[in-house]
Amino acid sequence: MTKRLLALTVNGRMREDAVAANLLLLDYLRGTAGLTGTKQGCDGGECGACTVLIDGQPRLACITLAAACEGRVVETIESLAIEGRMSRLQQAFHEKLGTQCGFCTPGMIMAAEALLRRNPRPTDADIREALSGNLCRCTGYVKIIESVQAAAGG
Amino acid sequence: MERMPQFDLRRPASIAEAAALLAAEPGARLLAGGTDLLPTMRRGIERPPVLVDLGAVRDFSRIDFADAGLALGAGVTLSQLAMDGRIVHHHRAIAEAARSVAGPGHRSAATIGGNLCLDTRCVFYNQSEWWRATNHYCLKLGGDVCHVAPQGSHCHAAFCGDLAPALLVLGASIELCARRGARVIPLSDLYRDDGVAHLALEPDEVLVRVLVPARSPALVSGYRKARARGAIDFPLAGVACALVARDGVLAELKVALTGTNSRPILLAGTEALVGRGIDEATLSALGKLVQKQASPMRTTVTQSNYRRQVAAALAQRLVRELAGYEPSAARASMS
């Protein structure tokens, strides 16, 4: 199959890669860009583990074509820590035990990151709605919500 | 899920180019948000040789408010609809329907055009290739028996888009563009009562815009849905209402349903309720209208009769909320 040149920004850096038309953004990030922080969960758009930001909006990398991200700005969990220092949101997940097994955490944090950029002082209902597309099989939702509240200063 | 099959991807810069590509490539499919089409392709249900990605089309996601009404580009995302303060204020049913779809990660990709053109769904259809093969496929795809109603010759897959009923009660029309030109049709004319081919679109037609007429200031609207899971789930039944209530009397009433039939339906007979007081007798008559016209079949694991009853209950509850009719005695009798 012919490949096309994909130019986009990933975590602040311009990239150009030759990608197949049917390459999913999830496989592009994990396989081509080597950014394995984004997780493959249900792989069908139902669990939110692969949530990344595209142009600042939460999106599911497992149901997004890489080629459709031409010219877009993609941010993954790897973009949050700066020089090894966790972001406020990451730190809050660490301190409030919002991370249990850790598999859903990158998706949870990116979904919460999108919320906090849009709404720095979310209510409990705002947080629940923003995370409503993210499943945690450890079922630790209370700690996850507390983590986002803590990051928001609540 | 299965691997994504191979296809050619085209990224036209205009609608005219997209329509030309559809005409030139038999079997080509339009790709907008892809939240439904891409999983369906991975299940082997859709196998288009060409995808025409509308993501690069200019002005495809514009929202225009004017005195004559609201014009929504077909590429407007559901999160745009849910968060636009003007839509929340003037056309609440649209914002509520958009907000009820799936999760935030879907809504920021999924579009109004995609939601209106959503494929019909069935528990015997939205399955993996091996599941469907083991079941000898079905009338909608690859087989000759509808497992929902094996004696009949009709596919009963249900239309489950949330936006269509909201737009139907607001009297929306849609603009379609093909190579030979554009046409505007009432939204209700987009749909046919056929689970296999529920969209009355020409092969090269592209849904370009949704046009919602200006509302009268007294009109209020809303959307409610019942679903198995509180997020990321299609409606077992969804109900939109638009009404005008004056001094406790219905001056206008429109109700539309989704999730219950192979097409979204604008409830017939609501004009008979106009002029009546908003009381238990009127709500009971409304419930009977819904139960008569909703025809859910066993396309979900939830029983059809529950979906029929919940559709009626949602319609009654929504009319009560919108009209501000909340006597405690009525609440007790409805529970």
Image: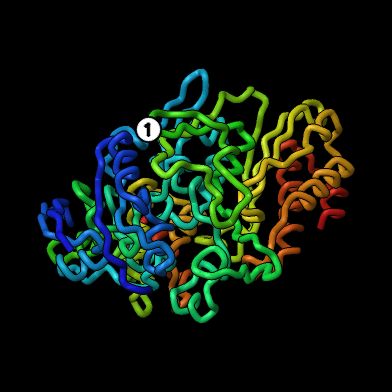
Task: List x then y, in percent, for residue A47.
Answer: 42, 68
Name which residue lies at 81% across and 30% down.
B274
**Residue A154 in sight from this viewpoint:** no
Q: Is residue A34 left or right of residue B112?
A: left
Name which residue lies at 41% across and 62% down.
B46
Is residue A104 shown above or below B175? below
How does the figure colour the protein chain or chains?
Answer: rainbow
| Quarter of the image with the C terminus of chain B in it | bottom right
At label 1, the amino acid type is: Arg
State the residue in front, B170 or A98: B170
Residue B62 location, quadrant: top left
Residue A62 location, quadrant: bottom left
Task: List x then y, in percent, for residue B117.
Answer: 48, 47
Mark 1 neighbour density, 10 Å: few (under 14) some (14–19) many (20 or more): some
Task: List x then y, in percent, for residue B16.
Answer: 31, 34
Is residue B317 shown above or below A10? above
State the residue in front, B19 or B13: B19
Dot 1 falls on which chain?
B
Name which residue lies at 36% across and 80% down.
A101
Disc 1 secondary structure class: loop
Name which residue lies at 11% across and 55% down.
A15
**Disc 1: which residue:** B62
Residue B261 location, quadrant: bottom right
